[in-house]
Image: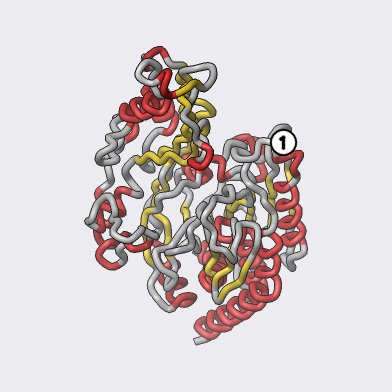
Amino acid sequence: MKATNDRLNADTVVHEHVDEVWSRDIVPTLHDYIRIPCVSVLYDPDWKSHGYLDDAIALIREWCAAREVRGLSVEVVELPGRTPLIICEVPACNGGADDDTVVIYGHCDKQPEMTGWRADLGPWSPVMEGDRLYGRGGADDGYAAFASLLAIEAAQRAGLAHSRLVVLIEASEESGSPDLPAYLEALADRIGSPTFVLCLDSGCLDYERMWVTTSLRGMVGGTLSVEILTEGVHSGEASGVVPSSFRIARTLLDRLEDSSTGQLLLPELHTDIPADRFQQATDTADEFPIGGHFPFVDGARPMVDDGAQQLLARTWRPSLSVTGVDGIPPVASAGNVLRPNTDLHLSVRLPPTCDPDLALAAIETCLTHDPPYGAHVRFLNGHAGPGWNAPPFAEWLADALAAIGERAFGKATRAFGEGGSIPFMGMLGQRFPDAQFVITGALGPGSNAHGPNEYLHVPTARRLTECLAHLLHAHATR
């Protein structure tokens, strides 16, 4: 009976403190964070002179350093030529072990603005509308640093044990984390050998329960550049003799993708789907179909109709998206000119267990060998990040997730594969294959990370903060 009462008292302390600080401190601070246009280094090579990433880092560092967390140290580390990183270290508390490390991860850089925002919204204009906080980066994943430190603070207030903690907040994740490996090397002694990794940068299939991510896709990005002329010429004079740079680009993409089905053609981009992940997709699709989560225009439909195949297509099969174009003028100013070049930015999502470096090399070779008509074809700024497939949950973690999800949300915790990428998870999974991972997040239906009208569902983020506090205790007392 005493143990039950102690647990109920701890639950109450955690719940009330998390609720109070989210309302009083985190939501207003997230308004300030959203106002900072701290887009990632890939989209703002002059980030240092612009100062926005430094502004975001300073805002987060100041908030974290002010928390009432016993033994907390907060430091901004900046390696030469790299975006900065925040590292917070907290010694074990309330009986936890100092020789057993937990890593909590988040990032503070953002995707670019994107067009299509509602007239009364904007990427850098925070708006609270009901339970939704609109603005770029609040959900992906600016809230993570605040939620992580608050979870630690709440756990300590409630007398819950936690082991030694390391919180890492990086500033290049939206560019594929190019700076993170250098920090993992430089801070290896301080990070140690974690047995548990927590991350709030993922999604959920509804806002009614805690969702745990079991896999993440890898990614290859780069720009396909096709140049056929040194300058634009009259289209009537040259067409039929000079090939269109757009048609050349289209021909090259046909080497990579079947344009009628969207299937990618290179064997290096495919892997076998594990039987347990196939079954998980089948089970989840029956109860949580995802086809309706997206803002299709009237009459449009998904590439595949079967719900399980939709989940597998967005988690365990490669896909190509053209996410940017240069060399093509807007329609309103398009003259009768045969353009000299077409540049397409490509985003290729990879299955979780696909080798990203082999995939990058295969894509570059596919697109650039034997260019049609002798055009100058290059694959610029190619970069790759690993995917991740979760190891099986240890018994203590499976039990904790079941109990904690019920207590915080009132419904059972569920698991699913995510279509996005968090390169850090792949990096850490390779370094520490025996660690346990909990990847979760508040990016649910309609939250639209990377797109217009991105929002954070605040009640979900608040409940996940409670879950994080209890997970730290479950790990320390396993």
In terms of depth relative to the viewer, which is nearer, 238 or 108? 238
Residue at the outermost front position: 236
Residue at the outermost top position: 374
- 18 over 276 or under it: above or below: below
Relative to residue 102, is residue 292 drawn left or right? Answer: left
The residue identified by callout 1 is 79
In terms of depth relative to the viewer, which is nearer, 326 or 263? 326
- 281 over 345 or under it: above or below: below
- 392 over 206 or under it: above or below: above
Q: Quadrant of residue 95?
A: bottom right
Residue 247: image location, x then y, percent: 37, 27
Relative to residue 352, is residue 14 drawn left or right? Answer: right
Q: How is the image coloured?
A: secondary structure
Label 1 residue SS: loop
Res 359 visible: yes
Residue at the outermost left position: 306
Relative to residue 353, is residue 190 drawn left or right? Answer: right
Residue 224: image location, x then y, percent: 46, 28
Q: Quadrant of residue 15?
A: bottom right
Q: Tell me the residue at 53%/83% (across/down).
A: 8
Residue neighbourhood size for the residue with mark 1, other residues' Cα within 10 Å, grouped as few (<14), some (14–19), many (≥20): few
Q: Tell me the residue at 57%/45% (across/down).
A: 173
Q: Tell me the residue at 33%/63% (across/down).
A: 292
Total residue callouts: 1
Res 396 visible: no
In terms of depth relative to the viewer, which is nearer, 476 or 365? 365
Q: Tell me the residue at 69%/49% (across/down).
A: 86
Q: Quadrant of residue 153?
A: bottom right
Disc 1 residue type (three-letter): Leu
Residue 204: image location, x then y, percent: 43, 62
In terms of depth relative to the viewer, which is nearer, 444 or 2? 444
Relative to residue 213, is residue 56 drawn left or right? Answer: right
